[in-house]
Amino acid sequence: MKNKLKRILLIDDDESSNYLHRIIIKQAEVAEEIETMTRADKAIDYLKDLNSSRPDDLPDLVFLDINMPAMNGWDFLNAYAELDLENKEKLKIVMLTASVNPNDVLRARTNVFVSEIFHKPLSVEAVMEKLPGLFP
């Protein structure tokens, strides 16, 4: 990747996964800042708030877990589709999954907002190999 991303947002209900993925992203040296959230509904509110107060601080990339309680990754994508964000097309969403269900992969690949799918847990190699292709 030519330049580090300004901000990555991790959305996963599992705090230990967020902790591990934060370390991996730091080791890959692909982002200046890493935010974590454990609830997708709160992440939607966070994006709305940033958009209205500091749109330049919106994340460049969102790592989104599929399976979460209350609002799952699919629900997040539906809510995200309704958001009126500045430069929405620049924000990349990468689905995170531990699922081996081929329907999850197909559903993610056919969603207009999903740029890539990563299998959990993230690895430094996967981050360094796949992210540059999302940010030419």
Image (cartoon, rainbow, N blue to C red):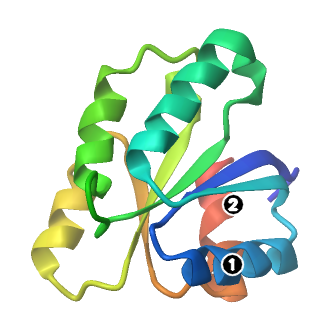
Kind of residue indicated by mark 1: Tyr
Task: Give percent across and percent down for residue 45.
Answer: 49, 30
Among all residues in the image, which is located at the extreme left? 103
Residue 19: mark in rendering: 1
**C-beta proximity under 8 Å, tags 1 and 2:** no
Please determine whether, in this image, residue 65 is positioned above or below residue 81: below
In x, y percent, where is residue 124? 72, 84
- Residue closer to the observer: 6 or 106: 6
Q: Which residue is mark 2?
A: 132
Does 49 sit left or right of 88 as displayed?
right
Tell me, for residue 29, which label it has, or none.
none
Q: Is residue 104 left or right of residue 126?
A: left
Q: Secondary structure at mark 1?
A: helix
Which badge, 1 or 2, is on the more N-terminal residue?
Answer: 1
Q: Quadrant of residue 6?
A: top right
The residue under the point 75% across, 17% down is 54
Image coordinates for residue 5, horizontal then vertical, percent:
79, 48
Foreground pick, 94 / 36 = 36
Mark 1 and mark 2: Cα distance apart in space:
23 Å
Q: Residue at x 61, y 18 (%)?
A: 51
Q: Position of residue 24 (x, y in %)?
A: 74, 81
